[in-house]
Amino acid sequence: MIEVKRHIQAPVQDVFAVLSDGWLYAGWVVGASRIRAVDDAWPKPGSKIHHSVGVWPALLDDETQVVDFVPNHRLVLQARGWPVGEATVYLELEDDEDGGSLVRLQEDVSSGPGKLVPQPVRQLSIAPRNTESLRRLAFLAEGGAYRR
């Protein structure tokens, strides 16, 4: 899996607060167009975000489920995007020496038709998408989107 990473000028707790608010998911995940519902238990393992992907009016309803969750450190997701398939997404956070955060993001297709595409070719589209997702995550964390 190709890893993308970003230094975010916000403490790990602030970045994780954005990740822990399922209603902000479409604000940082490239491709997620809207959130339809978020399980009350989000982001505990087994909980889901019910989202739509695509561009209106051609939206497909799907969901993302939490596989693993370690507060302020790790979030592992199983993201569905049919008809392409499913992807496993790993987000790891650590404190940066300047008081900010280092966020690492890895993703690859785990099932479905997208798995038929050779991994090096898949990564050509996944890496830039995830770079933009981390950019959006930084905007939300640095801007305080998690504060209500």
Image: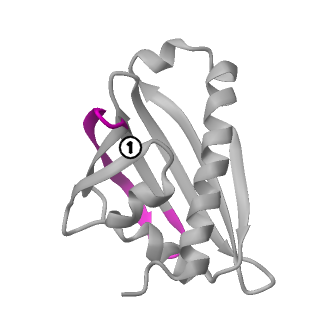
* Figure quadrant of the N terminus: top right
| Vertical order, 80 against 17 (above or below) | above
Name the residue tied to disc 1.
78
Q: Residue 143 at what x, y percent from top left?
A: 57, 79
Residue shown at the point (67%, 19%) measured from the top left: 121
* Figure quadrant of the C terminus: bottom left
| Residue 53 located left or right of residue 73 | left
Residue 60 falls within the magenta-colored stretch:
yes
The answer to which quarter of the image holds residue 73 is bottom right
Dominant SS in magenta: strand
Q: Residue 137 at what x, y percent from top left?
A: 56, 64
Question: Extreme front residue here?
Answer: 57
Region of the chain picked out in magenta, as a range: 55-74
Q: How is the image coloured?
A: one colour
The front one of 8 and 53 is 53
The answer to which quarter of the image holds residue 84 is top left
